[in-house]
Amino acid sequence: MANVVLNPASIGSVKLKNRIIRSATHDGLADEKGAPAPKLISKYVNLAKNDVGCIITGYAAVSANGMSPYPRMLRADSDELIADYKKLTDAVHEYGTPIIFQLAHCGRQTSSKAIGMQKVAPTAKRHLFYPDKAKRLNEKEIYDIIYDFLHAAKRAEKAGFDGVQLHCGHGYLLHDFLSPYGNQRTDKWGATLENRCRIVCEIIKKIKTETSLPVWIKFSATDNRRGGMTIEDSIQAAKLFEESGCDCIEVSCGTVEDGMNTMRSRLMPMEAVFKYKEPCASFPKALSRIALAGANLVNPLIKQPTPLENFNVDSADKIKAAVSIPIIVVGGIHRLSDMENIITSGRADFVSMCRPFICEPNLVRKFKDGTQTEAKCVMCNYCGLVIEKESTKCLMGKIK
């Protein structure tokens, strides 16, 4: 029944083992210079051995002022890293698995203290969770960032990656340019949808002109911010991306400011909040116990985004109808039967997952062997908070 999902497929020149993709996940396993540490290479090799269709790396910063506040983020801003990344791509390619390098700039969704310099953004707008002020980018600085993405893509090509993915979602810099919430400029980089898309389109064109790599995009089709991204804007943006040379779009949603919109769960992961999320993580033990008990009492009353599963499929369907390039959909997709339905109904061409592969890196192998038809991940979202202090791992049932 699931041949359409588990059989080989292609996205342009990229030949995938199947239609199940490991979506970009911050693993927190870079070394001190931002290169993939041996543990990260082993993690990706394990995914490749177990027949994941394609791997998209965790986000890699294209410039120093685009770093994440999370520890051990990958970097793509130095030629010295090429040899280290070549070890990664060679190791994954041994198992016939393509690997795409995700390039990102965190913009105002970081901390100036964490990155050691003032953060930047299209507009000097404060972030709900990282409220230190960002510097508004001038035109020269915008072009510098465009070239930072280009140079990072050139390094990706030399390192043997099969393509690059631009992270244009989840509240990071490129998303903030696309969104009228984050971009309140009145110059050629804002004000209209076409202007807001200009930086992304310029990056695509330059990479396509100066490298032979495919360019994929991940973006948030919608979010919960007033005046933020709407599906109507995203459909038009997708058309502009395709016209600029984009080869594939992965459809997600939300931002960090949206709370649990991007990674949904039935309840807020309160135990993880109090263990890993500041300022709660620094509470004295006695206060933490009392506060956690109170938080758990009110937790069932906190409204969570719905639906819990397959929550970007409608957006992917609408975007797919407007463009001719392949569409990947991510977000609460855990069942093989759902993947089959999504693809055979033409609502998306590929599916991608993050949390299920944290829980079960051998999930695709289980699907192929017929020993399992859905992921064991219960979407508790503990893994989404541990990254603030440690490397990514499944913590269900392990926090006390």
Image (cartoon, rainbow, N blue to C red):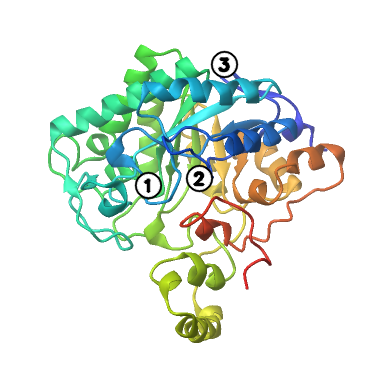
Which residue in the structure is indicated by mark 3? 13
Nearer to us in this view, 282 or 108: 282
Question: Does 45 sit above or below residue 90?
Answer: below
Residue 377: which numbered mark, if any?
none
Contact between labelled residues 2 and 1, with CB atoms less than 8 Å apart: yes
Kind of residue sitting beneath label 2:
His
Looking at marks 1 and 3 on the same chain, the residue that comes earlier in the sequence is marked by 3
Residue 26: which numbered mark, if any?
2
Mark 2: secondary structure: loop
Looking at marks 3 and 2 on the same chain, the residue that comes earlier in the sequence is marked by 3
Q: Position of residue 397 (x, y in %)?
A: 68, 67
- For the question of whether residue 342 can be seen, the reply is yes
Residue 68: which numbered mark, if any?
1
Indicate the quadrant where residue 148 lies.
Answer: top left
Contact between labelled residues 2 and 3, with CB atoms less than 8 Å apart: no
Kind of residue sitting beneath label 1:
Ser
Indicate the quadrant where residue 272 lies.
Answer: bottom right
Identify the residue at horizontal 29%, vertical 35% (top origin). Answer: 197
Q: CA distance from mark 3 to mark 2?
A: 26 Å
Residue neighbourhood size for the residue with mark 2, other residues' Cα within 10 Å, grouped as few (<14), some (14–19), many (≥20): many
Q: CA distance from mark 1 to mark 2?
A: 10 Å
Residue neighbourhood size for the residue with mark 1, other residues' Cα within 10 Å, grouped as few (<14), some (14–19), many (≥20): many
Quadrant location of the N terminus in the rendered image? top right
Kind of residue sitting beneath label 3:
Ser
Label 1 or label 3, whichever lies nearer to me, is 1
Q: CA distance from mark 1 to mark 3?
A: 31 Å
Label 3 or label 2, whichever lies nearer to me, is 2
Quadrant location of the C terminus in the rendered image? bottom right
Nearer to us in this view, 239 or 291: 291
